[in-house]
Image (cartoon, rainbow, N blue to C red):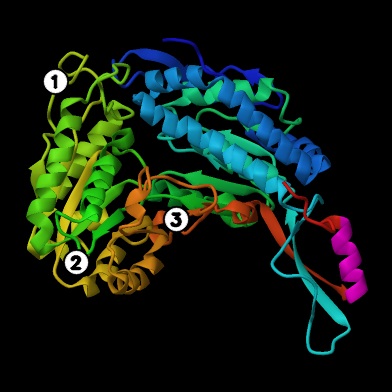
Amino acid sequence: MGPQLGSFVVGAWRQPSSAGVEPVRNPTTDETIASFGAPDFDAGEALAWARRVGCASIEALGWARRGQLLAELAGVLTRARDELLQLSILCGGNTRDDAKFDIDGAIGVLKTYAALARERPDGPWLPGAGGSEPLFPRSVLHGRQLLVPRRGVAVQIQAFNFPVWGMVGKLAVAFLAGMPVVSKPAAPGSPLAVRVAELLTASGGLPDGAFQLWLGSGAPLLDHLEPLDVVAFTGSAETGRLVRGHPRVVATGARVNVEADSINAAIVGLDLDPSHTSFARAVRDCAFEITQKAGQKCTATRRIFVPRPLIPPFREALVGALEPIAGQTGDPSLAEVRMGPLASAQQRSRVRAGIEGLARWARPVFGDPQRQGFLGVGPGVGAFLEPVVFEAEDRAAALSEAAFHRDEVFGPVATLIPYDDPSVLGAWVGFGGGSLVATLYSSDDGFLSRVARDVAPWVGRLVLVDAVSDLATGPSSGAVFPGLPHGGPGRAGDGSELGGPYGCLLYCQRVGLQGTEHGVQRFSEATVGSAVRQR
């Protein structure tokens, strides 16, 4: 069965109870590498300890010291990077590059929020927008908005695809804002999450009560929420709705942030042709977004809108880019492998079901979802799936109920969608119900401006790629930057994480301060600080 993974609760590592223990399998070999289950401990006591001990210990540190500790934790993970990369390959089915994306992303968030702390006043509270202002013309009464850490616990429920970045990124923001965390990882990838938790807790960089790791179901945690608690959930829209509607959430008014399904879009402009550098950039980016982490990213491109005359050359170029990746899909521990398996056999079954749904609305142009043979493994072994691309039928492109607009197939799968008139693009992107990101490829300012205005209300992040952008490196849409918001409207959850200092808003209470100008200013200096420190 492999080792039993423990939870870190109320300052100690605790083994799972005998009930409900499940295996964690290597998605490459199907071998059991660990067992995963909830601790034999009362969830209510764990949350109460975080509120009682964690809130006080974090607040006592102040903004500056919390930032220093985040920088130290970044160093802890950096020193353990090679070990974590190997564990990510083992339990997550990641290639080394995909493993870097997860682990280096986590380190990057820690460093970003550590730097953010150096740019802010060193008081226990945070300044809101603006300073002291008269409440009405010639009034002796003044007001100012301040941000106060919520004296509750942040329950952070993670998705399976980024066990390090998801956990550490959420932790960094909440800790800097002043809230203790109880983190609940998903079963796939949990050995990696546990190892990171071991490193963080052994480092001495987290004060008492600041961090707990809870394995197993998150339901017991939700059952004990209080009014000042925060739930930060990443996962499916269906599960997100259950979290929002949980009786305890409804009864207490605990704050909930959801990052859920997202049918992201890439839009190729009318001005592009196969000789245009942005055309090649769009093909390269789409192939990358389809296959990085085997398409198991919330920001992965699912719909590719292409002008009808460009569909044949774009299809040919995209297939040409995907063919070598499909041929080098297999055991991610092999140097020549470019894409590994999905996270689990269950996940592959879900993706195959989604592919069947897409096939009713679009024709397949690349990939065999039933393929068995992959590099370095025997036939039928592992949760492998090669890249799959569809092309929408004309009748379906403008229908909101088409599966490629409605269903997020969370794997290496995307659909080409032809368009004739760019005025439809805002509505068609909107058929997805709200997305995390959309990417526009064009050097025509008029096209970019017009389409961006139509698309922007439906997304949390809009990426503009023109001829100058072609000089940039890395993916356009899939990278999540700590300085920009990670979230989107509608089915994407209507929440927001990260976004530099705005990320802290989730874990703070906005308080309006009212008094005389002198009183407001004096209190502000005492609680926020009178100056911003320099780097």
**Residue 373, numbered label:** 1
In front: label 2 or label 3:
2
Outermost residue, bottom direction? 138
Do callouts 2 and 3 mark residues in contact (Cβ within 8 Å)?
A: no
Where does the magenta region start and end?
517-526
Which image quadrant for residue 10? top right
Horizontally, residue 42 falls left or right of residue 54, namely left
- Amino acid type, residue under disc 3 in the picture: Gly
Residue 110 vs 11, above or below: the answer is below
Could you tell me which residue is drawn at 44 percent across and 15 percent down? 34
Front one among 381 and 483: 483
| Disc 3 residue crowd, few under 14, some 14–19, many 20+, Cα 10 Å | many
SS of the residue under disc 1: loop
Which image quadrant for residue 432? bottom left
Residue 128 can be seen, yes or no: yes
Report how far apart the C-alphas of labels 2 and 1 lie in the structure: 40 Å
Q: Which residue is mark 2?
A: 270
